[in-house]
Image (cartoon, rainbow, N blue to C red):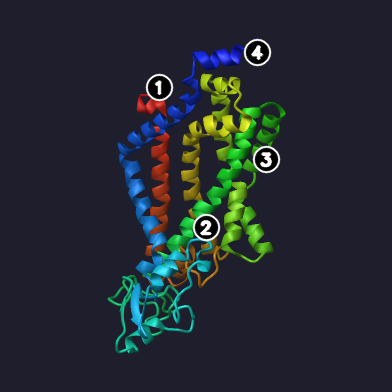
Amino acid sequence: MPRGEPADLDARNPEMLVASEGESKGYWRSVWRHFRKHRSGMVGLVLFTILSIIALGGHLLAGGLPIACRYKGTVSFPAVVATFHKIPGAKYVKDMPKPFRFPQFNAKREVPKDPEGWAVWPLVPWDPNEVDPENRLKGGSDTHLLGTDEVGRDILSRMIHATAIAMLVGFISMGIATAIGLVLGATAGYLGGWNDIGISRLIEVFICVPVFYVILIVLLLWEPGIYKVMIVMGLFGWTGIARYTRGEFLKLKNLEYTMAARALGATTPRVIFRHLLPNSLAPVLVVVAFGVAGAIFVESGLSWLGFGVMPPTPTWGNILRAGFDNLRVAPHLIFPPSIAIFVAVLTFNLIGDALRDVTDPRLTGSA
């Protein structure tokens, strides 16, 4: 090839410098336009929004800390600060106001004693681990809308705070899986050759590994914990993402805009991250959506078996287990976690199905 040809290509086709970026933006606008017309997908998106609000605003919806209060002449917002503390590192930015930071301080008992004090409480004024010994295994009432468990803890409060655990497990585990899958899939698809062969064989090996039993083994060898569950699910849940990414890169790397970018001197990282990756994410998002649903289901199963998040931390799985253990005397405990697990899994399956439909040109008519 003559040395002047890349420059000539640049002079003749300057629009190729921005073609892939424009195509990517136009493609995602088209995906969103079709997604908005997808009824079940929008239902899933609404349910996802509701779950996210519950997960992020758990302390504002249920808990023993007031949203706003005046105590000993000081106005503070303990529940708001507790919500802010969900952000990693936020505890170092803003401390919980005194005396609400002390575990032995009972705000529900002490704030009303202050003659000048007042408080705005959450909708469910019960901490998820607060015990009401006079109302054990009670059904729904004005005091406890969904009843109480075997030690007198409010079920609705525990369900609200368990939502954050479920969402955290789903997104962190799939975040780890997505990072691994994108790197390995992009490497295999773009570089090809022995890289493709080696990574493809590695994918086949990991596909054969039963993830659920690996998690059980890890939790039997080490102390059970939520982060161990998320890490193991992430380390073994990347195969589908890697396969789809590899397939998309094999298809896209020989298209005109990719060849033009290489001819104009774009480095390999720039070609991958600027031109190929944005246009290959759609099928990956489908896998991620289904993966989040699967992760929530797996965590609930592990907690039900006693290998997941340990009580008294509330999860849908251990609430369901408590209901199963007391099925004859308190059948009301079974229904809230069962419905929550069903709704969460359904939510991400609806989103995954919708993404699969709107990214398929045969179904959208954009082929």
Q: Residue furthest top?
A: 2
Callout 1: SS: loop
- Earlier in the chain: of badge 3 and badge 4, it is 4
Q: Residue at x 44, y 79 (%)?
A: 100
- Earlier in the chain: of badge 1 and badge 3, it is 3
Left or right position of 87 against 32: right
**Disc 2 crowd, CA 10 A, few/some/many (<14, 14-19, 20+):** many
Q: Residue at x 69, y 30 (%)?
A: 197
Which of the two discs, 1 and 2, sits closer to the camera? 1
Callout 2: SS: helix
x, y percent for residue 165: 48, 61
Callout 4: SS: loop
Q: Quadrant of residue 184?
A: top right
Callout 2 touching callout 4 (CB < 8 Å)? no
Q: Is residue 334 visible?
A: no
User: What residue is pinned by disc 2?
Assistant: 299
Q: Residue furthest left?
A: 142
**Gap in Å between the C-alphas at discs 2 and 4?**
58 Å
- Earlier in the chain: of badge 4 and badge 1, it is 4
- Earlier in the chain: of badge 3 and badge 2, it is 3
**Gap in Å between the C-alphas at discs 3 and 2?**
23 Å
- Residue closest to the eye, 56 or 320: 56
Of the residues shown, which amino acid type is indicated by label 1? Ala
User: What residue is pinned by disc 1?
Assistant: 367
**Gap in Å between the C-alphas at discs 3 and 4?**
45 Å
User: What residue is pinned by disc 4?
Assistant: 3
Which of the two discs, 2 and 4, sits closer to the camera? 4
Of the residues shown, which amino acid type is indicated by label 4? Arg
Q: Is residue 123 visible?
A: yes
